[in-house]
Image: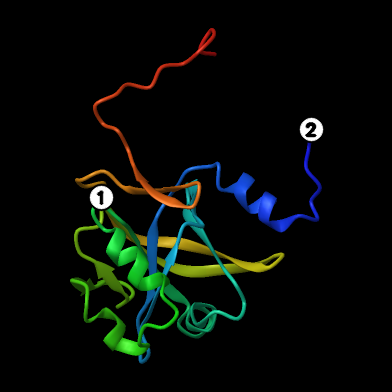
Amino acid sequence: MMSELADPQTLRRAFGAFATGVTVVTTGGASPHGMTANSFTSVSLDPPLVLICVVPDAVMHTALTTTGRFAVSVLAVDQGPVARHFADRRRSLGMSQFDLVDWVAGECTGAPLILGATAHFECEVRRLYDGGDHTIFLGAVLAFDGPGEPDPLLFLHGRFRQVDSGRQLTLGGSGR
């Protein structure tokens, strides 16, 4: 039986049943900024497009609309502390928020790329869409690298998880 949509906590838990990767989205420029996000999705291979979702009152929203470019670092399984750092709203802003992580400036965007991440994407904002309580930023991929080692960090049921590389995925039924 379907739950009532009026219960946001139950809806959040239901959305949380879908495992996602964990990323840090960054912008460069005069006031660089970083934000942990699991709302990152590949959209198209031709042309290469991705999307990220950001709440309108977030510092990142202003940074994205100001710079028009961003980078995405797909965090590796051992980078939970990095994810927590960029999710902490009490951290310092500007360049000093990157003091606790190793990073390099992206060649296309100047946005910080988190070292040790399993993949990086540098993007240019192409379009913005109303996504209810978020804005959907569609980005054209300008450059990328990866995938690398180790496995990516996952987020499921409100917690960081990891892939169990020692086990094979088996399909029930006919596998169709």
Tell me the residue at 35%/87% (across/down). 92
Residue lying furthest bottom:
30
Q: CA distance from mark 2 to mark 1?
A: 42 Å
Question: What x and y, as percent, mark residue 136?
Answer: 60, 64
Is mark 2 in CB contact (under 8 Å) with mark 1?
Answer: no
Viewer-side residue, 113 vs 159: 159
- Classify the position of the N terminus by image quarter: top right
Amino acid at dot 1: Gly
Q: Say which residue appears at 41% left-offset and 17% top-offset.
A: 170
State the SS at label 2: loop
Where 80 sits versus 4, above or below?
Answer: below
Where is 175 relative to 67, above or below? above
Instruction: Tell me the amino acid under the disc marked 2.
Output: Met
Q: Quadrant of residue 127?
A: bottom right
Q: Position of residue 3 (x, y in %)?
A: 78, 43
Q: Is residue 48 left or right of 167 when viewed as pictured?
A: right
